[in-house]
Image (cartoon, rainbow, N blue to C red):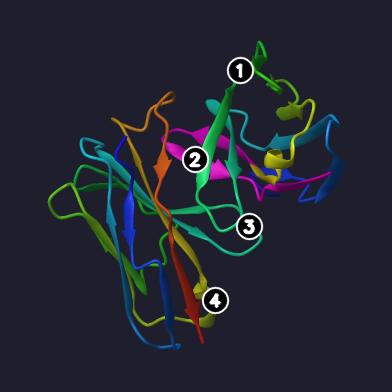
Amino acid sequence: RKEVEQDPGPFNVPEGATVAFNCTYSNSASQSFFWYRQDCRKEPKLLMSVYSSGNEDGRFTAQLNRASQYISLLIRDSKLSDSATYLCVVKDFQKLVFGTGTRLLVSP
Amino acid sequence: EAGVAQSPRYKIIEKRQSVAFWCNPISGHATLYWYQQILGQGPKLLIQFQNNGVVDDSQLPKDRFSAERLKGVDSTLKIQPAKLEDSAVYLCAAAGTSGGANNEQFFGPGTRLTVL
């Protein structure tokens, strides 16, 4: 079983749509959780941290369920500029473990 | 932040040749990471340095890969000899202190290696 599992997609959605990505992780002792964004042929960049209480940053909402070892990212009112790969990331001790990423394509 | 510099940006070599990548992290960022990202996959950690010491190299294929960070600043990653399956983007990242829970990792643009 992979340490961090994501649906690779792609998710094709129209502008304005709401889209949700899911992620599961295998190590129950994992300490911290993140979503990174990676544009085509670019480096990953931190989108947001994920907390058990849930957190929101504008159109983006992240949730963590430690009991189910499940992480989610919700994007509301999708923009063309949201097209990218979204990487679910888990921190085990000092090491980041990345999922394979979910590709999002937002079309006009 | 000033960013993480990497060179070269692209490299094409034949199998069994050697190659080296260079990384210059953000000034003052003590922790440096090298990742391998194969097409269609997420980055995989190869090695982590804290200043000039190795913290984790458990996923580094030590029969052909080596890395050093002699003065705790710049780092080089070498592959000798390269195999076809080493074709990937090699990403360098830096973090502030011990890479603790809230220390963001900043990635360089990566070196895209193609092994023919």
Which secondary structure is most common in the magenta stretch? Answer: strand
Give the residue drawn at x 71%, y 45%: A83
Image x and y of residue A63, in percent: 70, 21
Judging depth in this view, the residue of A29 and B68 nearest the camera is B68
Q: Amino acid at mark 1?
A: Tyr
Image x and y of residue B97, in percent: 28, 30
| First in residue order: circle 4 vs circle 3 | 3
Question: Whole-Å distance between the Cαs marked 3 and 2?
Answer: 14 Å
Q: Chain of mark 1?
A: A
**Residue assigned mark 3:** B41
Q: Are marks 1 and 4 on the same chain?
A: no
**Residue assigned mark 2:** A96
Residue A57: quarter of image: top right
Element at badge 1? loop
Give the residue drawn at x 85%, y 47%: A12
Give the residue drawn at x 62%, y 64%: B39
Can the viewer see residue A30? no
Question: Whole-Å distance between the Cαs marked 4 and 3?
Answer: 13 Å
